[in-house]
C-alpha cells in the first residue's frame, strides 16, 4: 500500500535515505546529517510529497519531492525529486512504479503542473526505462564538481 509518510516513519525513511545517499556523488562532499534530513522530511510533508510503500510488515520503498514555484514562471508549481528508494529485495515487484504513479496523483492534487525526477549517473538502466514508460522525458543532465574536500568530524 502506498501512503503518505508520517513522523512515525522517520526512522525507517532515515535508514533507506542513508542507503540512497551512499550511492550518490553527494556522499563525497557532505555527510548524511540526520537532523537536516528530519527537517527535510517535515518540509516534504508540508510543502511537497513524501510517500512510502508499506507492506504491513515493513516499509520497503519511499519517494520524496519538494513543491515550489517553477523557476521560469512562478505562477506555476513544479515538484522536484529529493530522493526515491526501493529496497533491493523489493525491486522488480512494481514498488517503484507504484510510487511513481502515486506521486503524480499527489502532485496533481497540489496543483503541480510538472514533476522533475532525477536519474543519477549510477542509476540502474531500469530507472530510465521506467521514467519513459510512465511518460517522463529527458530534459536536463546535471554535472557536479566538488570544490572542497571535507574532513569528517567524528
Image (cartoon, rainbow, N blue to C red):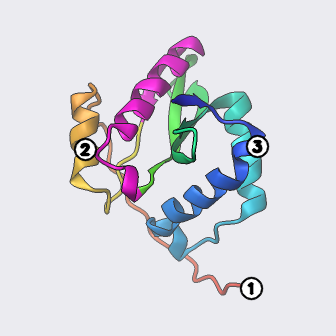
Write down the residue under mark 1: 153
Q: Is residue 61 left or right of residue 138?
A: right
Q: Which residues are magenta?
A: 88-116
Q: Is residue 57 left or right of residue 138?
A: right
Mark 1 element type: loop
Write down the residue under mark 2: 128
Mark 2 or 1, nearer chain start: 2
Mark 2 element type: helix
Q: Residue at x 56, y 74 (%)?
A: 29
Residue 7 is labelled as none
Magenta-drawn stretch, dominant element (helix, strand or loop): helix
Residue 152 image offset from top left, x and y in percent: 68, 84
Q: Is residue 132 left or right of residue 80?
A: left
Q: Quadrant of residue 111?
A: top right
> Can residue 102 be found in the magenta stretch?
yes
Tell me if residue 31 can be seen. yes
Write down the residue under mark 3: 8
Measure the C-alpha gap from mark 2 to mark 1: 36 Å
Measure the C-alpha gap from mark 1 to mark 3: 29 Å
Amino acid at each position: 500500500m502506498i501512503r503518505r509518510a508520517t513522523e512515525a516513519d522517520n526512522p525507517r525513511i532515515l535508514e533507506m535515505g542513508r542507503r540512497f545517499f551512499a550511492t550518490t556523488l553527494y556522499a563525497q562532499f557532505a555527510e548524511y546529517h540526520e537532523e537536516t534530513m528530519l527537517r527535510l522530511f517535515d518540509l516534504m510533508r508540508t510543502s511537497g510529497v513524501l510517500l512510502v510503500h508499506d507492506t504491513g510488515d515493513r516499509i520497503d520503498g519511499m519517494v520524496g519531492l519538494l513543491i515550489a514555484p517553477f523557476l521560469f514562471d512562478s505562477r506555476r508549481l513544479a515538484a522536484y525529486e529529493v530522493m526515491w528508494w526501493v529496497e533491493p529485495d523489493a525491486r522488480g515487484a512494481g514498488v517503484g512504479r507504484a510510487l511513481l504513479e502515486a506521486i503524480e496523483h499527489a502532485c496533481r492534487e497540489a496543483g503541480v503542473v510538472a514533476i522533475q525526477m532525477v536519474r543519477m549517473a549510477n542509476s540502474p538502466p531500469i530507472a530510465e526505462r521506467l521514467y519513459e514508460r510512465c511518460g517522463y522525458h529527458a530534459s536536463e543532465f546535471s554535472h557536479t564538481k566538488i570544490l572542497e574536500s571535507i574532513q569528517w568530524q567524528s
